[in-house]
Image (cartoon, rainbow, N blue to C red):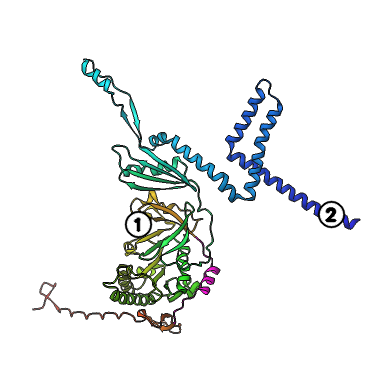
Amino acid sequence: MSTATATVGPAARAGLRHSLVFVWRVWLGVARWTDRHLRYVVGVTALGFLVRLLPGGQPAAVRVLLLAWLVPALLSAVWSHVSPGSYQRVVTGPSSRLGWLLWARRRWAFLARECGLSVQREQRRTMTGRVVDTFTSKPAPALPKVWVHPRLCSTTAKGVTLTLTVRARTGQTVEDLENAAPALAAAARARSFRCRALSPSTVEYVLVMADRLKATREAAAPVDVTVEAVPVGRRQDGTPWVLPLVGRHTLVVGCSGSGKGSVFWGVCGGLAPAVRARMVRLWGVDLKRGVEVGMGRHLFTEVATTPGQAVEVLSRLLAVIDERGRWMAGQTRLHEPTPSEPLHVLAIDELAILTAYADPEVRKEAGRLLAEVLTQGRALGVVVLACVQDPRKEVIGLRNLFTQTIALRLRSAEETRMVLGDGAATTAPAHRISPSAPGTAWVIEEDGSADKVRADFWPDQLVRDVATWHPAPFVEVPVSLVEAEPVEGAPLRTVHAPSSGPSSTARPRKPRAPRKPRQPKTADSSGFGGEAA
C-alpha cells in the first residue's frame, strides 16, 4: 500500500502542476488578448448592459453576449499560445493592416496639416459672386480661408509596411514632401520609414510599423551557387536582403562590435558553393593577425596577414586585371564569370591598417595598387569587399571609389554623413543603431532611398563547416614572401598562389629614379647662404 501511495503521489502532483501551468498560460493569453482587442471587449460589455436595461431584457441575453465574448477570447488565447505564427498570419496581421489603411485615409487631412504639408488659402469666388461684385459699388467681402492639402493618391498595406503615395499640391516640391517624412513616421508611430521620389511631383512613403530586425537570426549553410548577388540577411519589412556583387565594390563601415563579421562571412560564406564550382575565387587580406579569415581558411585561394603580404596580393590581382583587359578589349565591356574565368573577390578585414597605419612606403604602394584595382577591376571581374572602423578621409582616402556602402553602427551623425552622403543622418540614422543589435545597418538603394537591414549571424562552427564542405579547388603552391625587416627566429609567413593562370605572375615594381645631386652652397660675407660663384 505504501509503495502504491508513493508511486501515485508524485504523478498526481506533477499532473496538478502541469494543469495549473496550462491554466495560468491560458489566463495570460486571455489578458493579452483583451489588451490587444480592448475595443471589442468594451463594445460587447456595453452591449450586454444595454440589453439588460431594455424593457423585457432577460439575464439569459446577457449570458449569451458574455459567452459570445468569452469563446473567441479563449480560442484566440489558446491559438496564439500554441501557434503564434499562424495566429499572426491569419488574425493579427490582417486586422492590423486594415486598421493602418483606415487610419491613413481618415486622418490624412489632419496629418498633412500637422506635418507642415498643407497651406491655408482664401476660398475662390464663384461666378455669381464675381458678377455681383462687378455691378455693385460696395467692396467685396473677404472670403473664409480653407486648407489645401497634397493629394493622397493610394494607400497599400503589405506585411508590416504601410505605403502612402502622395502627390504635391501647387507650389510644393518633392523636397518639401521628403522633409516631412520623419514627422509623418512619428505620427504613425512607425519603427522606421523610407521615402522615395517617383516623379517630380509624387513621393512614396513606406512606413515600417513593426520591427522585424529585433531578433538575432543565425545563418544557414548555403546550398545554391550564386555569383551575381548573395543573400546576406533580411530587410526591415522581413524580405531577404540580397547584396549584389558583380560590378560592385563594397565598403562596410562600423565601429567595434557592430557586426562587420556577419557581413564579411555573409558574403564569403554565401559564395562558398560558387567557390567549389570554380565560379568564384576568394582572396583574403586579414590584417587582424589572421583571426577572422583563419576560421574559414579553406575557402580562400590566397591569404595575407601583414601589410607586406597584402601588397603582394594586390599585385597579383592587378596582373589578373592586365591579362583580362587584353582579351576583353573590343569583345565585351562587363566580365561574366565562368569556371575558366571566375569572379575574383578580394575580402579585406581592417582596411585602415593597410591605408593609414602601415609603414609609409608600404602604405603608398598599397594605396596605389588598391586605387588601380578599384578603378579598373569592376568591369573586369575583380571586386573588393573591405571592412573598416574609421570612415575619415585621412584613414580611407579611397572611400569614394566604392560603388556601394553599408553603414553599421557608427559613432556620430557626422560619420553617417561621411559614409552614406549628405542628408543621411535623418533618413538613415546609422549612429542611432542599438549596440544590442549587431549586424544591423543602413544601405542606400539604387533609386536613392535608404533601407534598414540586418545580416545573419555566422557562428564559428558554421564557418568552419562551410569552409570544409566547399574548399577552394585551385592547386596551392607556397611562395615565400620576405618582409622588409625580418625578425630573427620568427617563422616566415607565406601566401599561397595558384599554380597556373594569369594571377600567378606578379606585376614587377618600377625602379625608383636616382635623386639629383644638390648644388653646393657657400656662405657670403653677410653670413647667409648664397649660390656658389
Which residue is the extreme one toward the top? 137
Residue 279 at x, y = what percent? Answer: 42, 72
Looking at the image, residue 87 lies above or below residue 378: above
Residue 467 on the magenta segment:
yes
- Asked which secondary structure carries label 1, the reply is helix
Identify the residue position indicated by label 2 in the image. 8
Q: Identify the residue at horizontal 68%, vertical 46% (top origin).
A: 25
Among numbered discs 1 and 2, the one appearing first in the sequence: 2
Tags 1 and 2 touching, CB below 8 Å: no
Amino acid at circle 2: Val
Label 1, label 2: how far apart the Cα atoms are: 71 Å
Residue 163 on the magenta segment: no
> The magenta stretch spans which residues?
456-475
Q: Give the numbered dot on residue 418.
A: 1
- Quarter residue 91 falls in: top right
For label 1, count other residues whose C-alpha is less than 10 Å away and answer few (under 14), some (14-19) or many (20+): some
* Quadrant placement of the N terminus: bottom right
Is 186 above or below relative to 495? above
Measured as percent of width and height from the top left, residue 62 is found at 68, 29
Left or right, 115 with respect to 51, comes to left
Residue nearer the viewer, 234 or 310: 234
